[in-house]
Image (cartoon, helix red, strand yellow):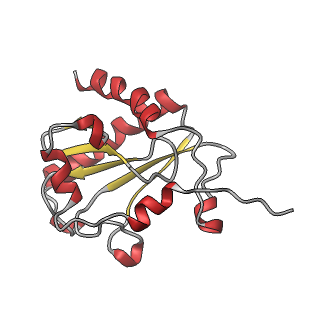
C-alpha cells in the first residue's frame, strides 16, 4: 500500500519571492511581532518561530547583527544565544510537552542553511514516535497544528519568562 501525504504549504517556500535584503535583519525592524512570529526580543538576539518548520514549535534564535560566520559572533551574542536556547527548551517542554530536542546551526548552503548569510540557531522539539523522519525520506512534513495555534501557546510563556 502506498500513502501520499500532501504538503502544499511547501510550495509557498519553494515559489516564494526572495527579497534583496536579509529576512533576519528586516523582520525585527517591523512593528508587528505577531505577524512575523517573533516571540521574544533580547538585547542582542530574538526568538522567532520558523515559518517552514520541521516540527510544531520549531524556533530559531537569531542575533540582530547581520553575521554569516559563527566565529565572528561576540562573546555576548554567543552567551545570549545559549541562554535563549535554555529558555526555549523549558518553554517548549511546558507548551508542547517536548520529550527531546534537536538544537543546531546549519552553517553554509551545503549544510542546509536556507539563509546562510545570517547565523541562527534552530531549536526543534521532538517526541517519541514523531514523524520527523519524513523530510529525509519523502521531502514531506507532518504538522499536526497550525503556526497560529503554536504562537498562541508559546507567546504567553515567553512573556512570563521575560518578566
Q: Position of residue 31 (x, y in %)?
A: 15, 37
Q: Is residue 155 left or right of residue 44?
A: right
User: Hey, which quadrant is residue 46 in on the image?
Assistant: top left
Q: Residue furthest bottom?
A: 110
The image position of residue 148, as x and y in percent, is 42, 35
Residue at 29% x, 39% y: name it. 35
Note whether 49 is above or below 154 in the view shown.
below
**Left or right: 96, with 48 as reference point:** right
Towards the viewer: 75 or 7:
7
Give the residue drawn at x 34%, y 28%: 155
- Given the current orientation, which residue lies at the most extreme right position? 1
Residue at horizontal 24%, vertical 26%? Answer: 162
How many callouts does the rendering have?
A: 0
Q: Is residue 89 visible?
A: yes
Which quarter of the image is occupied by the C terminus? top left
| Image quarter (top left, top right, bottom left or bottom right) of the N terminus | bottom right
In this rendered view, identify the residue nearer to me: 36 or 132: 36
Asked if residue 73 is positioned above or below residue 96 in the image, the reply reads below
Q: What residue is shown at x 61% (from left), y 42% (from top)?
A: 127
Q: Quadrant of residue 25?
A: bottom left
Look at the picture and state if 10 lies above or below 95: below
- Report whether 150 appears left or right of 46: right
| x, y percent for residue 106 | 37, 66
> Measured from the top left, where is residue 10 in percent x and y?
49, 59
Q: Tell me, yes or no, if residue 83 can be seen here.
A: no
Q: Is residue 135 left or right of residue 146?
A: right
Amino acid at each position: 500500500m502506498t500513502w501520499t501525504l500532501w504538503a502544499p504549504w511547501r510550495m509557498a517556500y519553494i515559489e516564494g519571492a526572495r527579497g534583496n535584503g536579509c529576512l533576519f535583519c528586516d523582520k525585527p525592524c517591523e512593528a508587528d511581532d505577531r505577524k512575523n512570529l517573533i516571540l521574544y526580543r533580547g538585547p542582542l538576539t530574538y526568538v522567532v518561530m520558523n515559518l517552514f518548520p520541521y516540527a510544531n514549535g520549531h524556533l530559531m534564535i537569531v542575533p540582530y547583527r547581520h553575521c554569516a560566520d559563527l566565529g565572528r559572533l561576540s562573546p555576548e551574542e554567543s552567551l545570549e544565544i545559549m541562554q535563549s536556547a535554555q529558555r526555549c527548551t523549558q518553554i517548549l517542554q511546558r507548551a508542547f510537552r517536548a520529550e527531546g530536542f534537536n538544537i543546531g546551526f546549519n552553517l553554509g548552503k551545503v549544510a542546509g542553511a536556507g539563509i546562510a548569510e545570517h547565523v541562527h540557531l534552530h531549536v526543534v522539539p521532538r517526541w517519541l514516535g514523531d514523524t520527523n523522519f519524513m523530510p529525509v525520506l519523502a521531502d514531506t512534513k507532518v504538522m499536526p497544528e497550525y503556526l497560529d495555534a503554536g504562537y498562541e501557546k508559546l507567546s504567553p510563556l515567553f512573556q512570563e519568562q521575560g518578566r
